[in-house]
Amino acid sequence: MEILDQITDLIRSKRTQIPTLSVIVQKVINLACSDDSTVPELVSVISSDQAISNKLLRLANSAYFGFSTKVDSIHRAISLIGFNEILGLVVGMGVFSAFKGKGAKEVLDMRGLWVHSIGCATAAREIAKKILPGESELIFLNGLLHDMGKVFFAVYFPDEYGAVLRSTQEAQTPLFRQEKEMMGISHARVAGLLMTYWRFPDNLIMPCRFHHLSKNCPHDYQQAALIVELADSLCHKAEIGISGNPVIVTKESIRRELGLSSNAQKDVMHILGEQKGEIEDFLDSLY
């Protein structure tokens, strides 16, 4: 069986070894899918899990957000950070926890990858604030989870993915292209399969699934995919974290397609530079 067939069988099989997300995270995903979700509903779901509540409050009080007063309740965290971003952070915690301790660090620099992912999430949110402000909180989550397919590769196909990473470095070629050539599938597509398995809504799945080929993304989600693709490039340029990709691809055509000015892009790069330390603090709170 080829690797692509093994991967799709592994994710789709009812006897799968793929970790499931907690009941709390599934409830939060359901809230994310609903147009009628309310703050009290979200407070109730999060407050029912003490561990998630404590992590969320620790994160809300971290240097990353830099609030001047102590955040002492989930309700206050939602009002300060935003409804959708809190949804995203809880889902992110669930995904981080699902793969924690699975052995991926023997293949990938896991801390470096998560720092890169948080940097990409930060850049995606800042870009969205300028051109798609109503979606900036959810696009943060797209940036946070865009590379989780790499973790799947490292956990379930460590030897094969180790060879891909070495070959990518030697050839100095984009990682997603080397994955496709050697494994038959890219980490972006794997992320899409995983998110479908976990029953994420399409507005979370599609931008991650197409973040390297955003122009192929279904129209309703294409702008978000473009933002994540540009954010990924800017995060590499800012040298935040380690993604395993040795090639920085300039995305000027995407910047122009999004209608983002060069000065606005410089502003995003400035924010990334300023927040390098805070991103590390964010990771310690989330992971």
Image: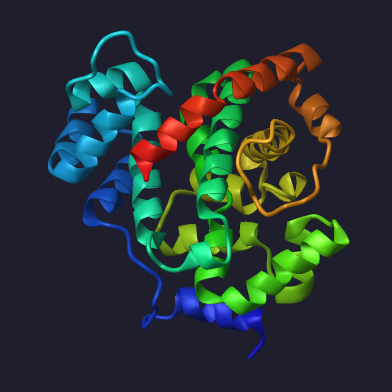
Residue placed at 79% from the left, 33% from the top? 254
Residue 184 visible in image: no
Residue placed at 57% from the left, 76% from the top? 157
Residue 231 visible in image: yes
Quadrant of residue 120 within the rendered picture: top right
Residue 32 percent across, percent down from the top left: 36, 40
Asked whether 179 or 280 is in front, the reply is 280
Q: Is residue 60 above or below residue 23?
A: above
Residue 30 percent across, percent down from the top left: 31, 47
Residue placed at 74% from the left, 58% from the top? 175
Q: In this view, does 232 lie above or below 96?
A: above
Render colour scheme: rainbow
Residue 99 percent across, percent down from the top left: 41, 61
Quadrant of residue 107 within the rendered picture: bottom right
Residue 88 percent across, percent down from the top left: 40, 38
Residue 8 in the figure: left or right of residue 232: left
Outermost residue on the top side: it is 68
- The number of numbered badges drawn on the structure is 0
Asked whether 209 or 263 is in front, the reply is 263
Quadrant of residue 199 within the rendered picture: bottom left
Q: Is residue 245 above or below residue 61?
A: below
The quarter in which the N terminus is drawn is: bottom right
Outermost residue on the bottom side: it is 1
